[in-house]
Amino acid sequence: MKMTMHIDEDVLDRVMKITGAKTKTAAVEIALSEMARRHKMKELFSAGLGMTPEELKNSFDPNSYPEEPERVSLVAEAPAPHGKPDPT
């Protein structure tokens, strides 16, 4: 469908860079599709799959949770001695 719209050029340029869209039309279509997808996900999460919080909690296998995540050094931190995390 062809239509005339007033869209902020800076926002459109940013969307094109973020998505890699080659055309303005593609960028708008991607952005609209993403908004619709996010709204659908929000609806699904809000519905809670029709389960109570306790049922949801019990439906997950505790063994499927990952181990304690490794500490990630921040850019401003000095490297830990011998490659081991700083205990502080």
Image (cartoon, rainbow, N blue to C red):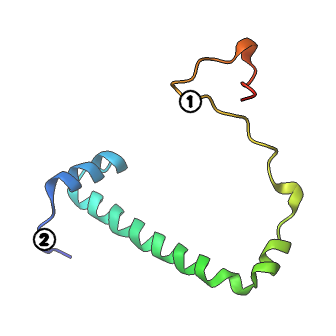
Q: Quadrant of the N terminus?
A: bottom left
Left or right of residue 83, residue 1 in this image: left
* Position of 1 relative to 7 (above/below): below
Report whether 22 appears left or right of 84: left
Give the percent coordinates (x, y) of residue 28.
Answer: 27, 63
Residue with the mark numbered 1:
74
* Residue 73, picture quadrant: top right
Which residue: 11% across, 67% down?
Answer: 6
Q: Residues within 10 Å of mark 2 (few under 14, many from 20)?
A: few
Secondary structure type for disc 1: loop
In this view, the residue in front, 23 or 58, is: 58
Image quarter (top left, top right, bottom left or bottom right) of the C terminus: top right
Which residue occupies 72% across, 13% down?
81
Give the residue type at disc 1: Leu
Name the disc covering residue 5, or none: 2
Q: Quadrant of residue 48?
A: bottom right
For marks 1 and 2, the one nearer the N-term is: 2
The residue lying at 29 percent from left, 53 percent from top is 15
